[in-house]
Amino acid sequence: MKISIIIPAYNSAKTVGHVIEACRQLIYPDKEIIVVDDGSTDSTVGIASRYGTQVTIIRQPHMGMSSARNAGWRAATGEICFFTDSDCMPRSDVLALLAPHFKKQNIGAVGGTYDIANPQKPLARLIHEEIFFRHRFMPSYVDFLGSFNCAYRKAALEQAGGFSEGHEMSAGDVNDLPARLLASGWKFTFEVRAAVAHHHETSLYRYLQKQFSYAVWRVRLLKDKNTVRMTGGGIGGMIDLAHPMLGLLLVVALPLLVFHAGRVLYASMFGLYLFLQVPVPVLIMFNRGNPLLLSLIPLTFVRGIVRGLGVAAGYLRYRP
């Protein structure tokens, strides 16, 4: 079973060489590497070209990552298409771990977890520790796969028409495709041992900006696709769904602070919201033996409010 490795890249000169090198080292007998340059204006193509016939390069005008992914899988000669991002570095055993899942004919895609490529950055480490902990509790069958580490059966991509090129923001395309495939009867599974090192966000502002955009686009998907389920994943469950709603409520209820009775009510809501931030960071802290990981509490506190504002913005933006 041949696997085509597809790397969409846009102005990725700083990292594309690293991901190509990592993909060359993947332990799997029958593979090809495809880099899709999405109209880069830097030396991305020049760096990828250094590998000669070891890498197939596809060039297109700048049309977005979903368009680049589609160009990649359509040119692929493998039965399985493995997608990773240009700032990622797959571990050498990723393909060997993902491939066996496709022995089941109803499996349309298999996803894996994160490793961290920039552990020296405090925010990146916090983000990674939370994701890593949650992924340990993922069920075998899932309803969402990230673009950084996922393998799709090419037949499933052909049936669905690939990634939606109408969702260019905030990974809307990789939310939309699973929804359509699940509706067609395909199953997704998760392999927690298969890891890809990723450069997590190092800027708090950019991180929260992305969280806001994710929430906006998730509202659009919920309105467009009933098959998308906003599960928290892992052990978060309904608590994760409550975070943005309670965070938004704290913003909307700020006028209550004008009144004495309102302050009491607001303090109760604030306390509940804060309490909900505590369990996961505490579990992570005990699991890793690092008290500094309790810094996740203020991070998730702010993130929940930002996501709540994103949900509100999404409903305003995509109201009938």
Image: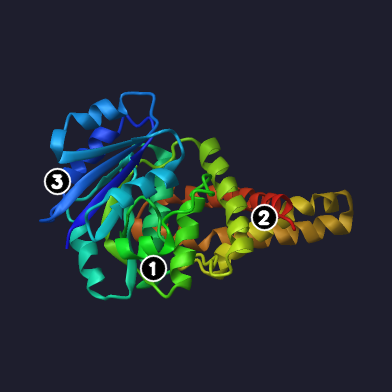
Q: Which image quarter is the N terminus in?
A: bottom left
Front-most of 240 and 145? 145
> Mark 1 is on which residue type?
Met
Determine which residue is flagged by label 3. Answer: 25
Numbered disc 1: secondary structure: loop
Rendering coords of residue 164 (x, y %): 48, 53
Residue linked to disc 2: 247
**Dot 3 lies on which element?**
loop
Q: Residue at horizontal 43%, vertical 67%?
A: 181
Image position of 161 with respect to 204: above or below: below
| Residue at the outermost left position | 29
User: Label 3 is placed on what type of residue?
Assistant: Gln
Note whether residue 277 is visible.
yes
Dot 1 or dot 3, earlier in sequence: 3
Q: Where 36 falls versus 228 (above or below)?
A: above
Q: Determine which residue is flagged by label 1.
A: 138
State the separation of the CA atoms marked 1 and 3: 28 Å
- Sequence-first disc among 2 and 1: 1
The reply to whether callout 2 and callout 3 are in contact (CB within 8 Å) is no
